[in-house]
Amino acid sequence: MSDIEIAQQATMKPIIGLAEEKLGIPAEHLDPYGHYKAKVSLEYLNSLTDQEDGKLILVTAISPTPAGEGKTTTTVGLGDAMNRLGKKTIMCLREPSLGPCFGMKGGAAGGGYAQVVPMEDINLHFTGDFHAIGVAHNLLSAMIDNHINHGNELGIDSRRITWKRVVDMNDRALRKITVGQGGPANGYLREDGYDIVVASEIMAILCLATSHADLKERLGRIVVAYKADRVTPIYARDLNAHGAMAALLKEAIKPNLVQTLENNIAIIHGGPFANIAHGCNTVTATKTALKLADYAITEAGFGADLGAEKFLDIKCRMSGLKPSAVVLVATVRALKFHGGVAREDLNNENLEALQKGFANLERHLHNVTVNYGLPCVVSINHFTFDSEAEIALLQEKCAALGVKCVVAKHWAEGGAGAEELAREVLDIVDHREPDFNYVYDADLPLWDKIETISTKLYGAAGITASPKVKTEINALQEKYGHFPICMAKTQMSFSTDPTAKGAPSGHTIEIREVRLANGAGFIVAIAGDMMTMPGLPKVPAAERIDISDDGVITGLF
Amino acid sequence: MSDIEIAQQATMKPIIGLAEEKLGIPAEHLDPYGHYKAKVSLEYLNSLTDQEDGKLILVTAISPTPAGEGKTTTTVGLGDAMNRLGKKTIMCLREPSLGPCFGMKGGAAGGGYAQVVPMEDINLHFTGDFHAIGVAHNLLSAMIDNHINHGNELGIDSRRITWKRVVDMNDRALRKITVGQGGPANGYLREDGYDIVVASEIMAILCLATSHADLKERLGRIVVAYKADRVTPIYARDLNAHGAMAALLKEAIKPNLVQTLENNIAIIHGGPFANIAHGCNTVTATKTALKLADYAITEAGFGADLGAEKFLDIKCRMSGLKPSAVVLVATVRALKFHGGVAREDLNNENLEALQKGFANLERHLHNVTVNYGLPCVVSINHFTFDSEAEIALLQEKCAALGVKCVVAKHWAEGGAGAEELAREVLDIVDHREPDFNYVYDADLPLWDKIETISTKLYGAAGITASPKVKTEINALQEKYGHFPICMAKTQMSFSTDPTAKGAPSGHTIEIREVRLANGAGFIVAIAGDMMTMPGLPKVPAAERIDISDDGVITGLF
């Protein structure tokens, strides 16, 4: 059965009753969106302040193949397993973007028997959070051009507008555009471009904001452009845009509740991509889960070099969160891929390639355990084609590094298939004290922060940038030197070359562009050819998606 | 008190219980969106087929001032009044667009004590229908450029792409743009442009579709471009886009229920503008109301020359609906405006100007009663400044034309203030038989249809078009000659000149552009300078919108 068929056969419970039964959230603090999705009121979340926090578990992964290695699936499977073992556990996931859903990767609601439901709703519009972010972003864009059109009292240098437009779609044609064509009625001509919604600074802001007031303050301090003196910033609040933007995000700031196939609660809230943004779900969602349960499991996007790095160096630093353990997801297939095996041969046993590709897992493990000082367990997301010899080799190599490696079969068996993983995780969390530290200090200069991430985590020899970009970094250093770095880099490799598999060393990370995200409170450093607007493949996944006459959706995966 | 303050003090009832109590809709057929909005399942609507239809009342208006004359307010007030008189009545409104909400006109949920609530939700994202339309539209756009980028097997002539992109925002900078800049990775360079979401053909399709199957079929037959032979159309179905688009509209196709301040049910569904699109709420919503109540009151956008014309010649023709009466909304202020009074002097009595401006009302009345053969009552949306002499003059002039003119005070008094209007409407609906006919026959050539609308309804001497546009109309005639016309024209005047107030005669209507809307099933004829993407004013309404620390929105109006 396909993921969507399994999801459509789920026996879902009405979410309001379920949230009350499992977590004790009173119905009056829940806003239903249909019968199986709900938003929790901020008043209720504020009332939890005095409750003790549960333990936080981070799920991350090796450098993934294009299909992903099953981080969300593992998060769901592990959560279901822990609940099966009688441990009150909430999963915190990111909201899927329509871009990959219609593109190549598919949706992001887990897979097999480890899914969150209603799968179609979650993958399509869900509770409208991304739409709200997109429209808040584009309102600000429209107000910038409108201000210039009506006389430009603020003196915006139209050549130095840094605020682009967004759409929740993979649309390469919009990466670089010219707006304002067609004569005086349409304003002034200028170059512009679109990012995908998940790359919007507003997505990051929503993920980091702690209240309506904090949200509005952050929106107000977004830098949208500079004056002709090149240095004086124009803020969103100068355009009086932030009040309306915050009003548009009134509901989006509230965490969303859904359930797994096994009727355990998951919070799905916020959804940046870790290759072009900071890649974590909202601080609000994670903190809520820690208040409501004894264990909160959350995911960070793509490989640990991107998702876990930003989770730890940005999200944890800004919010005070501290994980107790890390689950590193790997697949035998992906490790053979890193060992040089062609995609069509990944289902054949190949111990040599596995041995070689293990270097990728080893680097990520080293980063998690040594660079961040966090206890870690490796979870093999099991495929039918994995041979016993391959699994044995993997476990042996992990053991040699002092790390447990567990085979998890939640995809085929649901929570029951991840019980061994759950026991390992509980063993760590309940008995070991992490010695967590960030990979760089806040007071390190911006350039050195980028260099530290690149050399310590990516294995690079160093970083490079054009004189123009260096000048920009220097200019940012003065006012924003204390900001953490949000790297935008391919998820396919530790280098900026997506084809450099395994664990490349001694390479150079080229910083092509830097962007100030003043509302979010970090500096985006774009490495190599990374683009903040993906394109669709030759045959987009959208072509397979359909709906029957009685409204049943097919082809989502 | 402001509209939003009145709305925020409303005593709302949970919509699920209210819909069950008032209309007998079982809870299992309702999907809640929060506690005060809900969508009705299509299965339930299909189960009503055998029920007898109620009577249909259309609310339209004179040529409006920029703020609007209160069509929505009157629809709500009249509906509340009829319910007060014990008549089971449902109001059918259009969903507001974020464009005017952040621009100049404000929201569209009524005003004063004749509002639908929750006002902020309705005006901001509501149940996400517009976002779904926008993203379905932009998915198709992305798939067109993606197809060309990957080799263009279908042979799309990139100079003849007719499908633009959309955003739900007033953003003049996007009217004419160039996409695909930046080199081979970003596809092929071409001119493109954005329309506002309400002008999307998908909005029209949603408003006219009768089922999931009909929706998908209409989406599939959208013409997006032509081949290099200039005549062979490329359909959305050629790109395999229609299944995914229909899946995105799975929930949007279901009508939305809310309530008035007096706890009567209103259906708000679909929301095109009548100046650039066909301007009526969905056929599904109107038909549902007719099945569930004895009276359904619906509105059509802007003045009767636009909204009522399209309601009657497009929506009624396609769906078989037949109104029993028309309410023509006017204000003393707007009629004085049509009589030449400056905006700042509209609150002063001026009988001469009123007499002169009455020409506008008279033309609309003539159109409704003579051209369409429908019984009509004039409703004066009362303002405090209206003098008794002014009202008396209006009533006298209407009486001379054989039409009742009622002063309605629902804005200040709620339903109680519109009881006299309600009694007049009931008197007509229950005792008079309309002699309804369309203003043109379906088999009239396209050019002649446009000419008929222009001469019969707008008082024009004739129509004109460039040779290029004439050629296009001739080309469309062959295959689509039976389609009705959807005029895009300024709402400010019977002419294409927004400053030509009153009832201009003998003018010429210039058709600047024609567009085929094959999925909707009509031809859009754009007259004069009308633009399908509005701009923001110097001080956009967005600047006044704000949200408090505890999440209360202010400044929406």
Image (spheres, coloured by chain):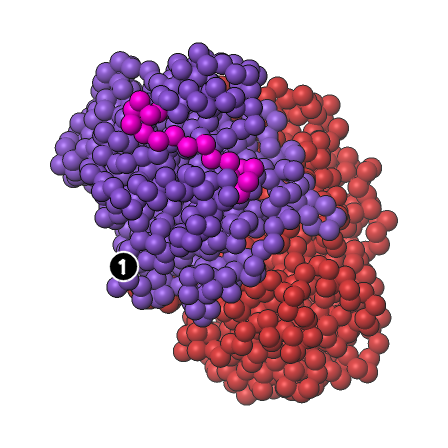
Chain colours: A red, B purple
Q: Position of residue A431 (x, y in %)?
A: 82, 83
Q: Residues within 10 Å of mark 1 (few under 14, many from 20)?
A: few
Q: Residue at x 36, y 36 (%)?
A: B327
The foreground one among A264 and B468 is A264
Compared to residue B282, the image places residue B476 above or below, namely above
- The x, y position of residue A344, in whole percent, is 43, 70
Residue B341 position in % (x across, y down): 49, 14
The reply to whether the magenta stretch includes residue A268 is: no
Q: Using residue A390 as the reference point, say whether residue B459 is left or right of it.
A: left
Magenta segment range? B398-414
- Dot 1 falls on a residue whose secondary structure is loop
Q: Quadrant of the N terminus of chain B?
A: top right
What type is the residue that disc 1 sits on?
Glu
Does B184 sit above or below residue B48? above
Residue B256 is situated, as x and y percent measured from the top left of the image, at 45, 55
Please give the name of the residue rendered at 84% of the width and 76% of the height, measured from the top-left corner: A433
Q: Quadrant of the C terminus of chain B?
A: top right
Q: Which residue is mark 1?
A: B52
- Residue occupying image coordinates x 56% and y 59%: B13
Q: Please name whichever residue, B242 or A255, is drawn nearer the observer in this view of the structure.
A: A255
Say which of A463 and B530 sits in front. Answer: B530
Residue A449 seen by the camera = yes
The chain that hosts pointer 1 is B
Q: Residue at x 35, y 44 (%)?
A: B426
Q: Quadrant of residue B442?
A: top left
